[in-house]
Image: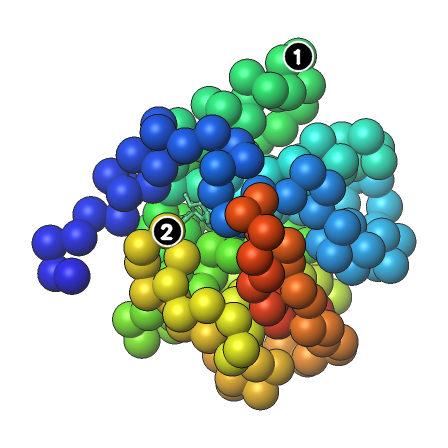
Amino acid sequence: MSDFNKKNHWENIYNTKQLNEVSWYQPTPETSLQFIQKLKLSKDASIIDVGGGDSFLVDNLITLGYTNITVLDISENAIERAKKRLGENASKIAWVISDICDFEPSKKYALWHDRAAFHFLNQKQEIEKYAQTLQNSLAENGQLIIGTFSKSGPLKCSGIEITQYNPENLASVFKELNLIECQQIEHQTPFDTTQNFTFCRFSK
Ligand SMILES: C[S@@+](CC[C@H](N)C(=O)[O-])C[C@H]1O[C@@H](n2cnc3c(N)ncnc32)[C@H](O)[C@@H]1O
């Protein structure tokens, strides 16, 4: 895997697969929205969706009235697809094309959301860098909502090995945060299969 280029990999995925031809497709990101709505954040709270791809989370956040949203993804193609779908609403979003491991946030976030992006980091130093960036950029009382494949979920996604998590090993990565709640979620893929996710919320 040493010559594996992750940016090229993701650009190619978003260049060749339609929205509903990928396992992570979700017409409504229900679990994320349930976790987020429980927080009762102010509508101008700063929210970042890390590895957001062309997920519908951002559409739903706009509809709910949130005004301070950032979407980060390694793939420019993914961001372009999301922008195109959103039309005029795209200008309401701060878009960042970056590997999360190279991201240097210029602001603090009240909410950091990540569904199915963090689990692609398999190297210890990348995982530590992610946790450090998160810690530095979460505001006081900031919240992390993270969804990863669980210990009974898949071992790979889009051909890449992932790291599986349960609440215990997530808590050991994000050890400077407080674990508030977790749920095991069965995600129904467009291919009539299921993938078991660990979804957790942490608070700073
Ligand atoms: C499985 S998809 C999930 C997309 C979206 N979060 C969702 O739930 O629909 C993983 C996303 O993470 C992005 N990604 C993978 N590795 C990344 C990295 N190191 N930095 C930033 N984004 C990354 C991919 O481009 C892709 O959009």
Q: Amino acid at mark 1?
A: Glu
Disc 1 crowd rating (10 Å Cα; few below 14, some 14-19, many 20+) is few
Q: Which mark is residue 107?
A: none
Give the distance between the C-alpha atoms of the residues marked 2 and 1, in whole angstroms. Answer: 31 Å
Disc 2 crowd rating (10 Å Cα; few below 14, some 14-19, many 20+) is few
Inspect this view and state whether residue 98 appears.
no
What is the tally of numbered marks visible in this picture? 2
State yes or no: Cβ of the residue under disc 2 lies below 8 Å from any atom of ligand 1.
yes
- The answer to which of 142 and 79 lies nearer the viewer is 79
Q: In the displayed structure, does residue 5 sit left or right of residue 157? A: left
Q: Residue at x 48, y 37 (%)?
A: 21
Q: Residue at x 70, y 31 (%)?
A: 59
Residue 60 image point, x, y percent? 76, 36
Residue located beneath label 2 in the image: 158
Residue located beneath label 1 in the image: 88
Asked which quadrant contains residue 199, the reply is: bottom right
Q: Amino acid at mark 2?
A: Ser
Question: Farthest left residue?
Answer: 3
> The C terminus lies in which quarter of the figure?
bottom right
Residue 190 image point, x, y percent? 58, 44
> The N terminus lies in which quarter of the figure?
bottom left
* Mark 2 or 1, nearer chain start: 1
Q: Secondary structure at mark 2?
A: loop
